Image (cartoon, rainbow, N blue to C red):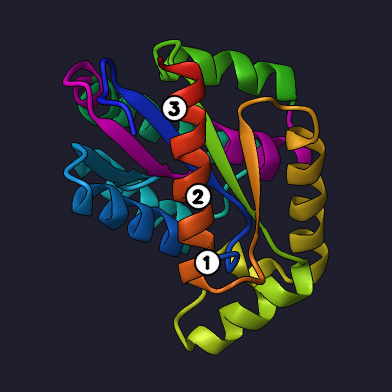
Amino acid sequence: MKLLRQGILIAIEGVDGSGKSTLARNLYLKFISQNIPTLLTKEPGATSLGKRLRSLLHKKPVALCPKTEYLLFAADRAQHSTEVVMPALQKNKIVISDRMGDSSIIYQGYAQGLDIKMIEIINNWTMNGKFPDLVFYVRLSAAQAIKRIKLRNKKLTSFEKEGKPFTQTLVDGFDWLFKNRSNVICLDGRNSPEIITEQAFNNFSAWINKYHE
C-alpha cells in the first residue's frame, strides 16, 4: 500500500445489525497493525455534544418530528466534522467513520419522507464540503438484521424498535442510493467479520494504489 500523502475519509454504512460497527472497528485495527495512521469515529456521538445528542436520538424521551430528528443529526455532524474529522484529515490520517451523511439521506429522507435534496445541501454544509472518499456498504437483508439485533440481548434503540417494514425500507433505500455510486464498495454482510474485514482491506488497498499513485 502506498504511503498516504493526504487524509482519506472512509464511511461505513448499512442498517442496524448489518455488522458495520464491527467492520469499522476491525478495519481500524487492521490499519493500525500496518502502522497506518488511522482514526476511528462515529456518527452520532464522537464529541462531547455528540454523546448527548446520541442519547437523545436513540432513547427519544420526547417525540421528535422527522425534521427535528434530522437537524439533531445535522448538529452532531457539524460538530463531528469540525472537531474530529477535518483536523485528522489535515494530519494525513485515514478517518473511518461508523455512519455519515448517507445515513440521514436514508433514515430521515428515504424512509421518513424528508426532502432528500435539502438533506444533501445541509449535509454538505455541516461536513464542510468534505464527503467520504470511499464508502463500504455492508449489505444484509432486513430479516437477517433484525435476527441479529434480537440475539444481542441489549436494550434497543428507537430505530431498532421500528421493526421489519421500516428496516426493509432502509435496505431498499441504501440499495437505491448506492446503485450507481462510483465511490461505494458493497460487502456481503452474511460473511464472517474476518472475511468482510479482509475484503474491505483488500478493496481499499487496490483503490488507493489505483487512484493515489
Residue on which the image places disc 3: 208
The residue lying at 73 percent from left, 44 percent from top is: 174
Q: Position of residue 197 (x, y in %)?
A: 46, 59
Residue on which the image places disc 2: 200
Q: Within the magenta stretch, is there residue 93?
A: yes
Say whether residue 81 is visible.
Answer: yes
Residue on which the image places disc 1: 195
| Distance between the alpha carbons at the discs numbered 3 and 1 | 20 Å
Stretch of the chain drawn in magenta: 87-114
The mark nearer the N terminus, 3 or 1, is 1
User: In the rendered view, does 7 fall on the left or right side of 135?
Assistant: left
Q: What kind of residue is marked 1? A: Ile
- Quarter of the image where one finds residue 68: top right
| Distance between the alpha carbons at the discs numbered 2 and 1 | 9 Å
The mark nearer the N terminus, 2 or 1, is 1
Q: Position of residue 164 (x, y in %)?
A: 78, 70
